[in-house]
Image (cartoon, rainbow, N blue to C red):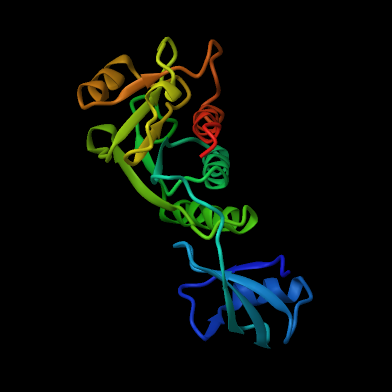
Amino acid sequence: MASHRVRVDALAPEMTLGPREARHLHVLRLGPGDPVRVFDGRGAEAEATVGALDEGRAVLTLGRALAGVAETPQPVTLAAPLLKGDKLADVVRAATELGVARVQLVITRHADAREIGDQKLLRLRRVAEEASKQSRRAVTPEVLSPVSLAELRWEGSLFVAQPGATARLTDYLAWDAPVTLLAGPEGGLADAEVAALETRGAVAVTLGPRILRAETAPVALLGALVATGV
């Protein structure tokens, strides 16, 4: 079974890859006739065979369809505050592995940054793509441009990780509608921010007695969700 997976725009009888992916196939010492897997980032996956290959492009021939890794019963969105350095990339990578459908970046009162450049946003989307390849997901999460908490919209339930909360995620999780999860930045969410979200129907939940780092909290929250076993 082919281990290398390639993201394509759409599954088609013949698919052409650009220079970046073609170079990657060269690095892996793959050539004409070798098998790969292709997926479109929206849930479709199939076997394929490398055809023409040079440093500028690769042509793949579509094979039989494959069943992708099972997704969550309802779409999960991670609302992630802007963090400095590589922390945000680490969060996007872990969130992809844990099954989110999208990452909505949010600007909060105590956020490490107030904006994100186009190049960093593109890099985060590439991180999500690479993580979906590695984790064998057929879905690549969207990484959406930042919005303020006041602009944040969600369907179904919003669970907010907040120190001092007593409710547990599993007490409220029903999987009958989409789920959005939010953890704060370094310094946490302001009480007023949490209160404003609660007036809109959000539920504040606990992540236990310890204070977690901003890049750890969303992974812990997603882990609690995945631990439901669905």
184 or 50: which is nearer to us? Answer: 50
Question: At 24% across and 26% down in the image, what residue appears?
Answer: 201
Above or below residue 56? Residue 125 is above
Q: Determine the residue located farthest toward the right in the rendered image.
A: 29
Q: In the rendered image, which quarter is residue 104 located in?
A: top left
Above or below residue 68? Residue 205 is above
Question: At 20% across and 22% down in the image, what residue appears?
Answer: 199
The answer to whether 89 appears left or right of 81 in the picture is right
Q: Determine the residue located farthest toward the left in the rendered image.
A: 199
Above or below residue 210? Residue 154 is below
The answer to whether 134 appears left or right of 116 in the picture is right
The percent position of residue 138, horizontal first and vertical second, equals 53, 60
Q: In the rendered image, which quarter is residue 189 located in?
A: top left
Q: Determine the residue located farthest toward the bottom in the rendered image.
A: 52
Question: At 48% across and 24% down in the image, what residue appears?
Answer: 186
The percent position of residue 6, horizontal first and vertical second, equals 60, 69
The percent position of residue 224, horizontal first and vertical second, equals 52, 28
Question: At 52% across and 32% down in the image, what residue appears?
Answer: 228
The percent position of residue 15, horizontal first and vertical second, equals 53, 82
Query: On the rendered image, what quadrant is the N terminus found in?
Result: bottom right
Q: How many marks?
A: 0
Above or below residue 4? Residue 98 is above
